[in-house]
Amino acid sequence: MTNVDVMAFGAHPDDIEITCGGTLIKLVDAGHSVVLVDMVQGEMGTRGTVETRQAEAATASKIIGAAARENLGLEDGNLHTSKESKHRVAKVIRKYRPRLVFIPHNEDRHPDHYHASEIAYEGIFLAGLTRYETGQESYRPAKILYYMSWYEFEPSFVVDITEQFERKMEAIYAYSTQFKPDDNFYKQTCLTSKEYNWALEHRMGYYGAKIGKRYGEGFLIKGKMEVENPLDVKFSTF
């Protein structure tokens, strides 16, 4: 599969679903091809195993409607920009040749998240260099968007995900070891608490309210947005 429409990078399996899952589902609903790329296998997670996380990621991918999902096999808890990590990003970019890429914002509470942002951006840049060798043709996507993890930012725009909200939550809770408190075999974490579910839903409600919708996801543009006709751009007075 080459020349897909959209690729999304996440540090851990479940990051993509939490942060931009609704928008990805909306893009699939509109007929666009989406590929998901996790950087680590989640081996440092408090709950579950690598094997259960793989099965959960496969289920979540089906709910989103992703055309493919890749795992770069980098080290959980020790993500950092290196020759090897950037090389793996460049290879997957050249393999699928996406038009648009979602990456984590480069400021966040979790070091893996902001390092994932740096790795993704630098790997994407390398993928466009003709003399950078991976055994593939060079390619660099034209559009990069930052999505919001733990820390918030002022978004360049907000996507209405009201119709996709239920499926986004289904994709998140496909990671039952991470988010459902029923399994008492593992210790409880902040992710299995009712407060986390409350915060997750209310953030989407907050950004949805910003555009007069029930639920929304905010994104930050890497670069500047060109507008041909301002009359075609939707504005919110909320």
Image: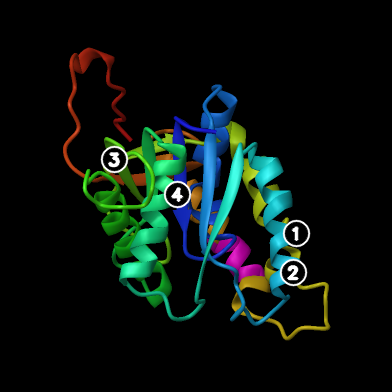
Q: Amino acid at mark 3?
A: Arg
Reply above or below: 59 against 3: below
Circle 1 is placed at which residue position? 55
Circle number at residue 92: 4
Horizontal and vertical percent for residue 88? 42, 59
Tell me: 230 left or right of 62. left
Residue drawn at point x = 16 percent, y = 37 percent: 224
* 1 or 3: tag closer to the N-terminus: 1
User: What's the CA distance linking mark 4 and mark 3?
Assistant: 11 Å
Magenta range is 193-199
Circle 2 is placed at which residue position? 51
* 3 or 2: tag closer to the N-terminus: 2
Q: Amino acid at mark 4?
A: Val
Q: Secondary structure at mark 4?
A: helix
Judge whether residue 110 can be spotted in this image.
no
Q: Quadrant of residue 179?
A: bottom right
Q: Amino acid at mark 2?
A: Glu
User: Tags 1 and 4 in contact by the CB under 8 Å rule?
Assistant: no
* 2 or 4: tag closer to the N-terminus: 2
Residues packed near mark 4 inside 10 Å, few (<14), some (14 to 19) or many (20 plus): some
The quarter in which the C terminus is drawn is top left
User: Tags 4 and 3 in contact by the CB under 8 Å rule?
Assistant: no
